[in-house]
Image (spheres, rainbow, N blue to C red):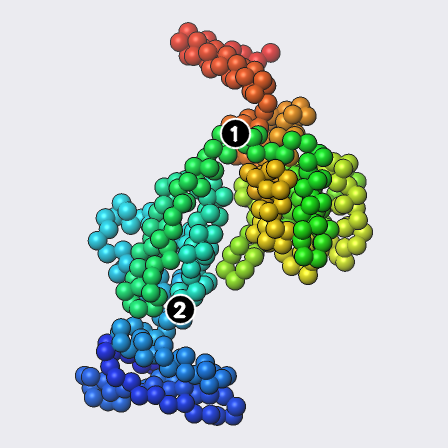
Amino acid sequence: MATPQQLPIGVSLTSDVEVREGRYRARVRWFDPITKRRRSKSMAVATPDEAQAWIDEMVSAAQGGVDPLAATMRLADYGEVVMTLALRGLERKTLDPYLAGWRKRVVPALGHIPVRMITNGVVDRAVHSWIAEEYSRSTVKNSLAVLARVMEQAVRDGIISRNPAKVTGWQREYQRAEDELNDPRALALPDWESLTRLAAALVARSADEFAGWGDVVIFAACTAARIGEVSGVRVEDIDRETWMWTIRRQTTPGPGGLIDKGTKGKRARTVPLIEEIRPIVARRLDAAADPTSRLFVGPRGGRISTAVLRDATHWDEVVTKLGFEHLRRHDLRHTGLTWLADAGVPVHVLRKIAGHGSLTTTQRYLHPDRQSITDAGTALSAHLKARWSQSGPKLRAV
């Protein structure tokens, strides 16, 4: 196979379109300024408009000296080509976190998208997903910074006209996420009646009044699960004898669309299915085709995400009318954990249900009165440990 020709900077192109067996072959030709030999590139497409669009891209690329393939490159591939240039001048202590942000966050979230299709909105949603995953402020900042540098190189290459990675407002959103972690109880729905009223309103506002949206909302709140985990549940994950759900996976955005992967903590966990939601689960188990069937899908059988639920039910409009302006999809999880804490579930059990890595995170769901008692016990333990370390003797178990 012939090696594709690289367009030199500023060459003049001639073009033509030829019809072959119902396809349109667009071609550009030029003289290499060094060898003086005639070079060419061609592309077969389905319509005359596509042929002309390709020729226009080649002309634009030649004017800027850009490899024509870069115009349609995926972000991951383009970044690999220009990364050295994009990060020039940075010190090593900055390079390492930038490259880690590119590899671990930017590429998984956006790497599959062609450079020209990356917009402010696409970047904004990626940044907010990183915040939702509870990455640190510096991690989000470094990931966004390396993306901005790569996209700035695309501007200089003439592939795009402006840098879409220059998003604003994410720092305020991050602060809101931190406030949420400090007081998640404030984000919970107050009672069962509020939850069922929300579910009914979301169903009524959806285009097809799809009852499944209400089931998803009630199930998420009553299991304190993330929407991605609700989307990932399969029939085989439910034990109908004990009414337990083993959470093994979640559905999240990935290259090419939604993908299934392990839980956030990388470990399976078990949560109870309370009586109020067993009819919802039983009905779906009875209708399931096989053990690997999803318990919850959209009206056309597709996978569910928090964005899908928001758009299909006009979430923001509905919660505002109900007086829950603050409520987001993730707050259904806060609702479930708050209700479990208020029901008297011991904090160590609540931690297992939530899948929290830190007991401190779980303790934020305790009622303030109970939290003060817990803090008193923690303070006593710290005091005794300090005394033991000073005096030498250790307390022996009996």
Q: Could you say which is closer to the camera, residue 90 or residue 330?
A: 330
Residue farthest along the top direction in this orientation: 391
On the image, which quarter does residue 36 sit in? bottom left
Circle nearer the N terminus (1, 2):
2
Left or right side of 298 for 92: left
Separation of disc 1 and disc 2 at Cα? 44 Å
Identify the residue under disc 2.
73
Identify the residue under disc 1.
183
Kind of element beneath mark 1: loop
Q: Could you say which is closer to the camera, residue 82 or residue 186?
A: 186
Q: Position of residue 294 (x, y in %)?
A: 69, 54
Decide: few, some or many residues near mark 1? Use Cα within 10 Å; few <14, some 14-19, many ≥20: few
Q: Could you say which is closer to the camera, residue 41 or residue 127?
A: 127
Residue at 41% of width from left, 45% of height from top?
170
Residue at 29% of width from left, 85% of height from top?
13
Q: Amino acid at mark 2?
A: Met
Residue at 68% of width from left, 61% of height from top?
300
Decide: few, some or many residues near mark 2? Use Cα within 10 Å; few <14, some 14-19, many ≥20: some
Q: Position of residue 292 (x, y in %)?
A: 70, 55
| Image disc number at residue 99 | none
| Mark 1 or mark 2, whichever is nearer to me | 1
Left or right side of 134 for 209: right
Q: Position of residue 39 (x, y in %)?
A: 29, 87
Q: Relative to residue 324, is residue 315 depicted above or below?
A: below
- Count the marks: 2
**Residue 228: in sight, yes or no?**
no
